[in-house]
Image: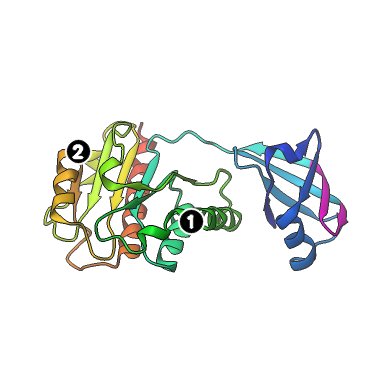
Amino acid sequence: MRRFFVSPDQVQGSRITLTGREAHHFRSVLRLRCGQVVEFFDGCGTVYQVEITTIQSNLIEGAIVGQYVAKLDEPFPLTLAQVVLKGKKMDVVVQKATELGVNTLIPVISRYCEGRTKSTGRVARWQRIVIEACKQSGRAVPMHIAPVTSMDTLSVVDYRYRICCWEKEKQSLLLSSYLEVAGAILLLIGPEGGFHEQEMEWVRDNGFHIVTLGPHVLRAETAALAAVSIVKYVGSLAGAGC
């Protein structure tokens, strides 16, 4: 079933009105027709099944024929603090982190960060990527993208668990033993050039568990997706026993 994003203010009673970019995509690209049933999500957890009743040049209207509220509570909500990567590598991390269920992404500026002066201007693009990834993956609540922050001002106080992946670390972490009780997780992933030793001192001082992802040096975007997948999987197993 086709999925579309609709803001809550476009839901009026038993009807939904779609305008702008999404309406154009609906009519001119997908060429959907009246009478078809499609799915809308409002970004707050509610998903609607809607029968289309009106298709105009910049206006789509439909009648809500069903709806449900997605489960939002997670025992181990995951925040990915990703040092900003160059070009489309960061786009890939944003897309796949959304698909994998990351709750929040914090773009981080570090010493070896690529394109640091352009990072804030890329946030709008990342937000569009998040919405498209939600459509594809069936996710009901988009991943939140926090403001770009420097590494030394990254706040860690709200996280019970703090994990940093570092290619020079020799120790591994048994996550199934580490994630003992429910709590928020902060996962820190570095840039293409790795972390500076002074940054690693900050990591240690702020209570991170520093771990390796294996014997091979991974690309930054590969490290992010591998680490997220591992943490989400182990968290789901631990959460089942909470």
- SS class, disc 1: helix
Q: Which mark is residue 121?
A: 1
Nearest the viewer among 205 and 15 is 205
The percent position of residue 106, horizontal first and vertical second, equals: 39, 47
| Protein image colouring | rainbow
- Rendered-image quadrant of the N terminus: bottom right
Q: Specify few, some or many for label 1: CA neighbours under 10 Å numbering under 14, 14-19, or 20 or more.
A: few
Amino acid at pointer 1 = Gly
Q: Is residue 236 visible?
A: no
Which label sits on residue 50?
none
Whether residue 60 appears in magenta in the rendering, the answer is yes
Considering only vertical position in the picture, is 229 above or below 45?
below
Q: Which residue is mark 2?
A: 206
Residue span colored magenta: 54-64
- Position of residue 90 measured from the top left corner of the image (x, y, whole percent): 41, 62
Q: Quadrant of residue 186?
A: top left
Name the mark nearer the viewer: 1 or 2. 1
| Residue 197 visible to an observer of this rendering | yes
Compared with 109, 92 (above or below) is below
Q: Residue at x 31, y 55 (%)?
A: 227
The secondary structure that most of the magenta stretch takes on is: strand
Instruction: Give neighbour class at mark 2: few <14, some 14-19, many 20+ (Cα, 10 Å).
Output: few
Residues tagged 1 and 2 counted as in contact (Cβ below 8 A): no
Q: Residue at x 43, y 47 (%)?
A: 102
**Cα gap from disc 1 to disc 2, whole angstroms:** 29 Å
Quadrant in which residue 45 is drawn:
top right
